[in-house]
Every structure is written in C-alpha cells, then in structure tokens.
Amino acid sequence: DTAVSQTPKYLVTQMGNDKSIKCEQNLGHDTMYWYKQDSKKFLKIMFSYNNKELIINETVPNRFSPKSPDKAHLNLHINSLELGDSAVYFCASSQGTGYEQYFGPGTRLTVT
Amino acid sequence: GQQLNQSPQSMFIQEGEDVSMNCTSSSIFNTWLWYKQDPGEGPVLLIALYKAGELTSNGRLTAQFGITRKDSFLNISASIPSDVGIYFCAGFTNAGGTSYGKLTFGQGTILTVHP
C-alpha cells in the first residue's frame, strides 16, 4: 500500500564508488522529484521529472544522473561518490503542477 | 535564490500547550504548504494554502497564508506527545514560465512535547 517507496533505505559506500537509488510511486502521479536533506535537516530540490521529461535541474553536479523509465519510476545514479554526498535523499511525487508533493521514506547515504 | 526564514528553530513545550511557528520570505510565493517530518521518515503534508489571507484548519492545526504572500504561520492547539517532530514550511514557485514548479523549504522547527 506504500504510496512512494525507495530502495535501499540505507546505503553505506566508499568514496569513488558509483551507486543508485530507486524510487517508485503508485499514486498515478505524473511528476516526480529528488530532494537532498543535509545533516542540518535542510531540504533542497535536486531534480523534477514530468512524464519522464526533466523539468527542473537545480545546479546539481553532473555526477548525479536521474533516470525516469516511466512516469511511476525515478531513479538516481551517483558517480564517483564524495564525502559531501552523505545525506538523506528523498523521492517525492505530485500530480500536475506539483503544489502537493508526497514524499518517500528516504535513503540515508553514508560515504566513507 | 529564494530563502524562507522559519522560526523558532526549536520549541520545548508541555503537553496541552498551544504552539505557534511562522515562516517569512523576501519573495512572494503562490502557494504555502506545511509539512511534518517524523524521525526516519519523509515529510508528510499537513496543510496547503492557495490564496493570500486564506486561513485553513486540519484538526488541531491551523495555518494562514499572509496577505503580502511573503509569510505564513502554523498553530497547533492542545499539543500531544505525537506532535513531536520537525515542522517545515514550504513555498511554491513556478519554474521558468511553465505551470510546473518547485518547493522551497524553510529550515524547520523542531518540536518537543513533554508529557
């Protein structure tokens, strides 16, 4: 019954590695997002996709590459991980213009 | 970029007390929203406000969209232990001439309720 799900919940990896986080929503929404929450709990949007098309890219390093195979899925691939990438990453979805966004449970990424 | 100033940063209250927190911005937002985040979970939408001056309630929660469209407040009445968490305000702006847009979040208010 989970509306927005993410895998994995926790991800511990070493600097320089490449990793992916997956997100799926079963709400029938057409817009999906990735957010980063830092250690001070500050939430900032990274990307937004509508019907598999990128509509927002908030000056995120190009080591981060989102991919949307269909409108129910939005994955995040991160190359050459750095210590500063350690954070909680949230996927969210909305219908239409995106006023009301529904968030997944988050993926805690720790880079050592 | 746009910034939202949310205050207070943290609150420690007794069960049964009322709580008030607010959010201000130097920019106008079309929509204001309030979210709550429990530990280890994603933010959950509490209230959405669509028009300047709008006052909306959701149970013990009441929120208002400021007349200037640059501020909003959230009140929680008769707090209970499960109100503990981080409360975020968020303002919505359109992205580059499209109808789609993004949320800009405040820094959050950490609420602790003592039984």
Image (cartoon, rainbow, N blue to C red):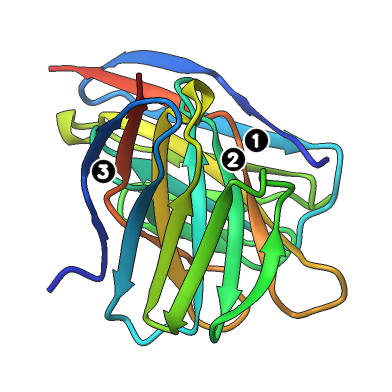
Single out the mark in the foreground, 3 or 1.
Answer: 3
Closer to the chain start, of discs 1 and 2, is 1
Three-letter residue code for mark 1: Cys
Label 2 belongs to which residue? B73
The alpha-carbon separation of the residues under discs 3 and 2 comes to: 23 Å
Question: Can residue B56 be seen by looking at this rendering?
Answer: no
Circles 3 and 2 in contact, beta carbons < 8 Å: no
Label 3 belongs to which residue? B41
Rendered view: B11 above or below B107 = above
Tag on residue B23? 1
Q: Are marks 1 and 2 on the same chain?
A: yes
The alpha-carbon separation of the residues under discs 1 and 2 comes to: 6 Å
Closer to the chain start, of discs 3 and 1, is 1
Closer to the chain start, of discs 3 and 2, is 3
Say which element carries label 1: strand
- Taking depth in this image into account, of B58 and B48 the one nearest to the observer is B48
Three-letter residue code for mark 3: Glu
Q: Is A99 left or right of B99, judged from the image as shown?
A: left
Tag on residue A78? none
Q: Is B72 left or right of B47, judged from the image as shown?
A: right
Q: Which residue does the image show at 24% across and 32% down from the upper left?
A: B39
Say which element carries label 2: strand
Chain that bears disc 2:
B
